Image (cartoon, coloured by chain):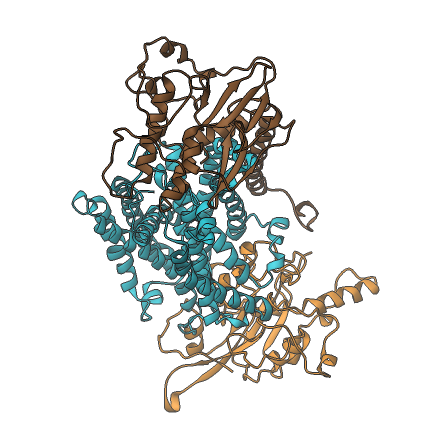
Chain colours: A brown, B cyan, C orange
Amino acid sequence: MLPRTDGFHWTATHLIFLSLFFAALLIIVSTLLSGIWRTVADFRKHRANSVCWRETFQELPENERHCRHELAGRVASRLCDNAFDCRTCRNYAHFAILPATWRNGVGVPYSDRLLYHRGHTWVHPELDGTFSVGLDEFANRLIGRPDSVQLPEVCAELESQGIAWSMSRNGHHIRVRAPLTGTVIATGGPDQDFYLKVLPHGKPNLRHLLNGPEVPGWLASEIERLQRQIAAPGAPHCLPDGGTLMPNLMDAEPQADWDNVLASTFLDM
Amino acid sequence: MSEIALLDRRWITRGVQRASAGRFALWLAPWFVLLFLGAYAAGLCFFYGLNQTNMDNRFAFGLWIFADLSIIAMGAGAFFTGFLVYILKQQDLKPVLNSAVVVGFICYSGAVAVLMVDVGQPLRAWFTFWYPNTHSMLTEVTFCISCYLLVLILEYIPLLLKNRQLRKIPAFLVFEHQFHKLVPGLAGVGAFLSFFHQGSLGGLYGVLRGRPFAYRQGLAIWPSTFFLFILSALAVGPSFLMLVVATAEKVTGKQLVQNSVYRKLGFISGVLLALYVAAKAIDTYIWLNITSPAVGFGPRDFYSYWPLSSLFLFIATVPLGLLPAILMIVPVTARKRGCLLCGAVLASGGVLLNRFVMTVQTLALPTLSFDSFLKYTPSWQEVATFGGVIAYGVIVYSLSYRYLPLFAARKGADPNASQD
Amino acid sequence: MSARYGMVIDLDRCTGCGACMVACAAENNVPPAHSRATARTGITPMLVRRLSNGTPGADAREAFIPITCMQCGHETPCVSVCPQQAVEVDKATGIVLQMPQRCLGCRYCMTACPYHARYFNWWDPQWPPGMEQTLNPGVSVRMRGVVEKCNLCHARYHAATEKAAGAGETQIDPLDYVPACVEACPTVAILFGDLADPSDPVSIAADSPDCFRLLAQIGTDPKIHYKTTQDWIRALADRNSLRSHSPEAQHV
């Protein structure tokens, strides 16, 4: 190489050229290494799941990011700016104390005893300290009976907003988000009244799950979103005026853009 | 939906409309044919040697070098758009930034591929890094283009990782999230590298004192062609980007970016083109009246041979120089998309003509007074290889458009409306 | 002390016989031309070109001009452009040496050379069976994809230095270092020697007013000088003097 080349001697040109080149190369390589290092750090510090969820949240269109407080009628209009994670939202308490409005005639049954995740799973605290997790009625009526279900193994760890289990239906692969963090202690399925039983580590913070007047407001907006997405392109918008969501909509409307519908429903872009 | 269609759909960004898998395959098919033909021609050159081309000892550089210089000039839109968005904070150009990165990646990887076929001993390519001649413009070009291709690959990776299926892999998504924050730094390095290699490509010819047609005086070690090539590359980059996006819009039948983006790109291109024409005019005057006569050459030596006469100089300056600049700057014409694109085509033509003149005309003209004007026609292998690179570009861009979020969705838009 | 080897080629003596070209090819292991080779893809480190004054009839005149690497001494174009320093100016001899083993085949040097004295190996060298016995063992064979040119038979210089070293001498005997083309010329049209040595005949000849260099105005300081007393040759070949535009130059 240079210094051993016969007759070679260092000149200012060599120094300038090579130092500029190596500086540029150093910046490029260190940028790549920095990216890799930060990624590894995110995994080590268990932040990877949160990063993935926030990146996915960024892909949601604005009209699918209504804040729970808007859905509950506490505010006229508000978009969520914290990836639906009310546990860390600085404005949560400010809005939570405002009076809410209950909606009637939503079009899909729901229960006051359940806490709902915006990815259409419900959580029910059991007396033994575990939490049952299931698919809500909106999702059930949307997809009907899944063709196959891949549940996590017992003792598997779930992270809130991560992926809990997956299903397939009519060739579509559906990933269902976990509503809470904990260890899977039992698995169920579509034939049982739960999909998973989860034991959280300590007392879980479930503030991000919907309850009370938020649930009908949210379900009504979901049905509105569903109607928009299923309608043929160019067709006028129809607003619901009563009636309930029919079961097994996927088979009833095979021509709809289910790819889009399922992505919005299960928050998996 | 058939299984193949479903499988294909799963790889497409959710919520966007794309042509059916069958139609897309039909679109790609002829380009693949062209690509394989190019690969075959390149294979012949690797196997049998460069005698497969029509290059010879007098035309040591031919179609491929012209193609390389032109492709790299067109790819300048990549670094320039990145520079405008990240360094000069021109956020209204953000919608075309991803496209610019893909175009840049295609142009530089294609140019390097052609270069590997063009050199006699491709396996010795690393010699330039091991025994660099810091006085040679080609050394500078090699170093900068290699580094910049690395930058473009790294800028392309986050876009690739945004693919719907790839982002499901947590490691990819997290890396994309982290790396995305570091891209502005890369854009800065990319701008620095691009500045130098665009200039050095011009410097390749400007330093040739043995070719008075190409030789120019300049500033310190840099001949004027160094600066002129940078300026022309900056001018044509946005134009070419406009043409690529407009073509994508035409082929897909969608409006992908707003008119204001076109106007801004056109305005930037037009202003730089006008500056370039002025600088080139001054440079030409100095070259014809001072530099060349000092070594015993003059316009008669350069422009006496048809068809490469002074008409080329006029064409490069006015119809392919001033006219497109005016079309893209003056509001009366710049307001109309057709005029803007016409300007972009003419500007690109002007830069192609300039690259042709510097590569081919330099070699065609005699230097020794008893020599004659020479002609050169590329062989089918050369044309096919060039065609293969163009096909490669179309294929990569088409795949990127179909499977990657190339154009940012407009927030709050009606999801039923035809959009991207 | 460093030498500056160069030549003075007397165009009034050159008959265009081409013996220099043949000797060069033989000395430097230039392979037989491929069946598809043309005048522009052959390898001719020494190339004799024909000059004609373009006048028909009795006033028609022809001359021959051997073109070879001019061994440029000032800002040598090919040296400064080679990206991997495969060309260098030898300090001891002033010869511009090409290293085919390091050549990438980018051909930038060929573009840079104003004398078109560089040649690319477009084909792999092949010798018909039996002809490999004509190979000169002192000169390496080049593979396809690399550039080559005249190096003033540097292998002969090398042999001369070895002979001198063997005899305990520090300077070579000038008679031991004579390039093949100089040796082969039947009319002694090529004078070869050390331009840096004022007593050397080539140095004295180069100072003659009848001498000129091709493209001297470009300023590359070529070491190959041409000598002629005929004005029309001077006018045709030397850009510094009056030029006409009807010259026809052809290869022999």
Of residue A169 and residue B60, the one placed in the foreground of this image is A169
Whether residue B389 can be seen here:
yes
Residue A143 against residue B333 in the figure, above or below: above
Of residue B75 and residue C111, the one placed in the foreground of this image is B75
Image coords of residue B254 (percent x, y)? 29, 48
Q: Report the residue at 66% width, 77% height from top.
A: C126
Quadrant of the image occupied by residue B175: top right
Of residue C230 and residue C125, the one placed in the foreground of this image is C125
Image quadrant in which the N terminus of chain C is located: bottom right
Residue B307 against residue C48 in the figure, above or below: above
With C192 as the anchor, is B27 left or right in this view? Answer: left
Quadrant of the image occupied by residue B317: bottom left
The single residue placed furthest to the top in the displayed view is A97
Image coords of residue B123 (percent x, y)? 62, 58
Image coords of residue B274 (percent x, y)? 27, 47
Of residue A247 and residue A208, the one placed in the foreground of this image is A247
The single residue placed furthest to the right in the displayed view is C167
With B265 as the anchor, is B199 left or right in this view? Answer: right
The single residue placed furthest to the left in the displayed view is B332
Quadrant of the image occupied by residue A40: top right
| Number of marks | 0
Whether residue C88 can be seen here:
no
Image coords of residue B168 (percent x, y)? 52, 37
